[in-house]
Image (cartoon, rainbow, N blue to C red):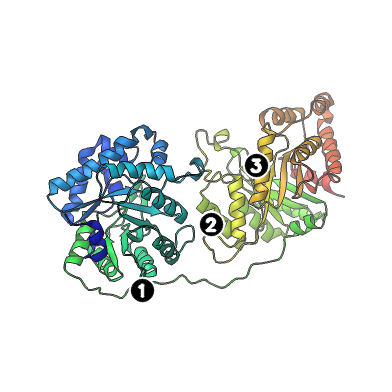
């Protein structure tokens, strides 16, 4: 059998197989992951390997892309690590033997997975462990593929090399603009990868053949052969299933001809590609097809070279210059009509006291109007500056970025990053939050946007100018944890803080003592006027982080018809005391009489 290293270096281009994972999952239902089929449906794996070989593939990859210990553990399959990897090589070699053809078997190794915080800092042992298992069963080379993070790919390559001398093909995933989601361009990736002990570099997965060709064009001219194994195109969801576009075989023939001309020594497919597409690649190479259209890489054009807006928000100026800040916290409407809320905001503005309005984000997990949207409407209609709350509970990182960029375009600048009440405590029993990031991650995301980058470090059109606030709970059950999280929020870029509702400022003082002195960022204290003893009981016993002192509860219980007056008197005294101990306050407006707070905050 020919040597795979010589073939990659001297040609002609090798035809690789297509997307095993989706095909395995479709053919063998109820798998926890495609790699489990190596044990539960081995005949399916062999059949798919053979279908690609019969279509013209000269290189097939083991069904082990996600068979590292980290990913298998997430599916409770870590005890089957050895069996899954060894069976995968056995099945690929069996398919080669059945076909009677010269076929190279590549050991597929992918990244550790999405939950980065769950893995140890040293990831190399995960990759080395899997590589040693694959090499021990008789593969011809490694395909270290579908990496979005260049640092992780370098770690994987070094780990594989530490246990095996077999050739390594290193593949990254690029978008339509020729960059990874982390903002690493194909040219930069090729420069760094060319200095490692690999035999070929290139692109796989991604948005489709056009994106792979864009990446190859940026990589062309380096000393290493190239490889291109793209997805068939952009996937979509239909009825809970991932659906791939039906690309014409002719399209993949044209792709193969372009890839060959750009120096690809290995051409195949990834997710969504079937034996049909691999057969089209085979025909294009066998027939020495000429390209029918020039390869055009259209670079993304910015709408305008926008400079960062340097003007501060009024809130930022007031806090920086030491003016005592007062905000009124309002809940967004539970329906689609914001007229009532806008009227309340207008009354606060007309009071002429320079107050702000902060808007909750689905407090107590009751769905209401998006606070960013309603805040934009308030600022546009009333002219009062707002502080919308935002939680990562309800949307992905991509969704958070999208809504924040839209809000910024509408003039929203102040944002309070909060964790948010879990959905199952409110109207959505049994529902789980999204929480791709927590409040610290959301703070980091906002800071990244202010630096002109998205969450993954990829450049956006222009930097934002958000003034970033965070929540602080001086009454936390675990004060050490709350202190640690507060410090991490500050490190992530927090510029001001708003406390959980407090009824005794000594709690804040004790928290700051544990911090080691005054807060490095301004703090607004939460004040909620109690209107009844019953409300005090509910807040004290049912709402995490709120402590109503016993003596205040006793006063309200004994106050009879005066309980609302007692509650407001206490809130007024708390607000007055806060003037010497905090940068400001926010006052929670009573639900039925929101404008009653003007009695407290009016000078």
Which one is nearer the viewer's eye here, 367 or 254?
254
Q: Going by the image, does 251 lie left or right of 116?
A: left
Element assignment for label 2: helix
- Which x, y percent locates residue 446? 61, 55
Residue pictured at 31% horizontal, 48% vertical: 108
Element assignment for label 3: helix
Q: Earlier in the sequence, mark 1 or mark 3?
A: 1
Q: Going by the image, does 533 lie left or right of 203?
A: right
- Which x, y percent locates residue 246? 27, 58
Which residue in the protein does label 2 denote? 402
Can you say whether 179 is above or below 97 in the image? below
Q: Are marks 2 and 1 in contact (CB under 8 Å)?
A: no
Which one is nearer the viewer's eye here, 172 or 55?
172
Q: Are marks 1 and 3 in contact (CB under 8 Å)?
A: no
Which residue in the protein does label 1 denote? 296
Residue pictured at 68% horizontal, 35% vertical: 480
Which one is nearer the viewer's eye here, 124 or 118?
124
- Which x, y percent locates residue 113? 43, 45
Q: Earlier in the sequence, mark 2 or mark 1?
A: 1
Residue pictured at 31% horizontal, 61% vertical: 227
Can you say whether 206 is above or below 528 in the image? below
Q: Residues within 10 Å of mark 2 (few under 14, many from 20)?
A: few
Q: Nearer the viewer, mark 1 or mark 3?
A: 3
Q: Earlier in the sequence, mark 2 or mark 3?
A: 2
Tag shown at residue 485:
3
- Which x, y percent locates residue 412? 65, 58
Quadrant in the picture for residue 500: top right
Quadrant in the picture for residue 305: bottom right
Q: CA distance from mark 2 to mark 1?
A: 29 Å
Q: Residues within 10 Å of mark 1 (few under 14, many from 20)?
A: few
Q: Quadrant of the N terminus?
A: bottom left
């Amino acid at each position: 059998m020919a040597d795979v290293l010589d073939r990659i270096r001297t040609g002609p281009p090798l035809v690789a197989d297509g997307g095993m994972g989706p095909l395995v999952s479709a053919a063998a239902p109820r798998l926890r992951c495609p790699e489990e089929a190596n044990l539960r449906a081995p005949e399916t794996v062999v059949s798919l390997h053979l279908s690609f070989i019969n279509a013209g593939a000269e290189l097939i990859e083991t069904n082990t892309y996600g068979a590292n210990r980290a990913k298998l553990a997430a599916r409770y399959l870590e005890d089957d690590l050895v069996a899954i990897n060894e069976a995968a090589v056995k099945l690929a070699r069996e398919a080669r033997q059945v076909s009677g053809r010269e076929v190279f078997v590549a050991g597929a190794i992918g990244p550790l997975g999405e939950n980065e915080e769950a893995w140890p800092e040293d990831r190399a042992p995960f990759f080395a462990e899997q590589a040693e298992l694959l090499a021990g069963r008789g593969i011809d080379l490694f395909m270290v593929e579908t990496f979005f993070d260049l640092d992780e790919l370098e770690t994987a390559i070094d780990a594989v090399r530490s246990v095996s001398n077999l050739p390594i093909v290193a593949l990254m995933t690029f978008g339509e603009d020729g960059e990874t989601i982390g903002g690493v361009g194909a040219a930069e990736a090729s420069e760094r990868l060319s200095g490692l002990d690999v035999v070929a570099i290139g692109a796989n997965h991604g948005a489709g053949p056009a994106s792979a060709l864009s990446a190859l064009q940026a990589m062309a001219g380096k000393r290493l052969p190239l490889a291109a194994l793209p997805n068939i195109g952009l996937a979509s969801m239909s009825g809970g299933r991932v659906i791939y576009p039906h690309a014409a075989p002719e399209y993949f023939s044209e792709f193969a001809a372009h890839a060959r001309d750009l120096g690809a020594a290995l051409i195949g497919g990834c997710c969504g590609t079937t034996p049909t597409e691999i057969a089209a690649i085979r025909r294009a190479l066998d027939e020495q097809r000429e390209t029918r259209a020039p390869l055009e890489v259209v670079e993304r054009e910015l709408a305008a070279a926008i400079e960062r807006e340097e003007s501060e928000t009024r809130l930022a100026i007031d806090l920086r210059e030491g003016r005592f800040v007062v905000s009124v916290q309002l809940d967004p409407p539970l329906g689609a009509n914001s007229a009532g809320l806008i009227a309340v905001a207008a009354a606060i503005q007309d009071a002429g006291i320079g107050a702000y309005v902060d808007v909750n984000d689905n407090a107590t997990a009751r769905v209401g109007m998006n606070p960013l949207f309603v805040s934009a409407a308030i600022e546009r209609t009333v002219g009062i500056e707002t502080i919308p709350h935002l939680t990562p509970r309800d949307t992905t990182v991509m969704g958070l970025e999208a809504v924040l960029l839209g809000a910024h375009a509408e003039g929203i600048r102040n944002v309070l990053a909060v964790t948010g009440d879990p959905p199952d405590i409110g109207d959505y029993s049994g529902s789980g939050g999204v929480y791709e990031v927590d409040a610290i991650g959301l703070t980091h995301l906002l800071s990244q946007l202010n630096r002109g980058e998205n969450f993954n470090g990829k450049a956006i059109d222009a930097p934002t100018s958000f003034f970033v606030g965070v929540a602080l709970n001086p009454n936390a059950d675990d004060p050490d944890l709350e202190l640690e999280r507060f410090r991490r929020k500050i490190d992530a870029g927090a510029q001001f803080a708003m406390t959980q509702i407090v009824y005794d400022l000594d709690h804040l003082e004790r928290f700051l003592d544990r911090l080691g002195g005054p807060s490095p960022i301004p703090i607004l204290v939460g004040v909620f006027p109690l209107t009844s003893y019953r409300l005090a009981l509910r807040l004290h016993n049912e709402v995490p982080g709120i402590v109503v002192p016993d003596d205040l509860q006793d006063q309200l219980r004994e106050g009879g018809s005066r309980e609302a007056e007692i509650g407001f008197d206490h809130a007024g005294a708390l607000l007055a005391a806060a003037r010497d101990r905090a940068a400001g306050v926010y006052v929670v407006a009573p639900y039925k009489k929101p404008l009653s707070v003007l009695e407290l905050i009016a000078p």
